[in-house]
Image (tube, rainbow, N blue to C red):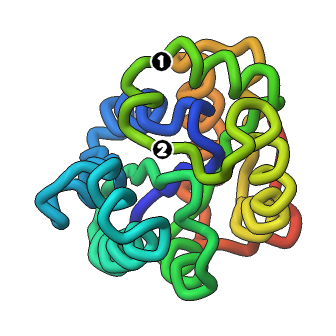
Amino acid sequence: MILSLIGYRGTGKSTVGRLLAERLGWSCVDADERIEQAAGKSIQAIFAEGGEPAFRDWESRVVAELCQLDKAVLAWGGGAILRAQNREWICSAGPVVWLRADVATIDQRIHFDPSTQSRRPNLTTAGGRQEIENILAQRTPLYQQCADFQVDTEGMTPPDVSASIYEWWTKNDEPAASSNDDASDF
């Protein structure tokens, strides 16, 4: 079983994933790092050479691979849920937690995290807040569809987010994979 963290970039998936995995005694895998390893090149290079479709193809290969792991916290890229097959694999592999934040917070976090800016290109010509708003409008229903639990990370530290997920996890005694219809909210 895996525990998946989904949400837009800048919501804390990678940082929270490491903290949560440590607390559970599990491994943590950052899907973007695994994509770069599998492709043998950076995400920027994948986008430059083949555009978003090439990146999404690599992402789907990695989703299929990582969903076979056991006792792992998976920090998925923000768009991992775009393809129906990826959603099916992710939801079938174990509980899914959606990390949320408002547009202004996401924009600020991305702006002040140089690794996020240098690693991932803009996905639209809009850039900035407008891009975040546009993409969230597209992805929010998909995040909702997948989520067993949601955490609004607004004003929370990564340890706080990790603790709330851990509390939910233990309260539900390692919940079964994806009922998703009534995702609880923290």
Residue labelled with disc 2 = 121
Whichever of callouts 2 and 1 sits on the residue coming sooner in the sequence is 1
Q: Is residue 125 left or right of residue 129?
A: left
Q: Is residue 144 left or right of residue 115?
A: right
Q: Is residue 4 above or below residue 70?
A: above
Query: As shown in the figure, which amino acid type bears the numbered disc 2?
Result: Pro
Q: Position of residue 82 (x, y in %)?
A: 63, 72
Q: Position of residue 102 (x, y in %)?
A: 82, 30
Q: Is residue 26 left or right of residue 59?
A: left
Residue labelled with disc 1 = 113
Q: Is residue 139 left or right of residue 124?
A: right
Is label 2 in a helix, a strand or a loop?
Answer: loop
Quarter the C terminus occupies: top right
Q: Position of residue 176 (x, y in %)?
A: 59, 70
- Which of 59/177 is in front? 59
Is label 1 in a helix, a strand or a loop?
Answer: loop
- Which of 66/121 is in front? 121
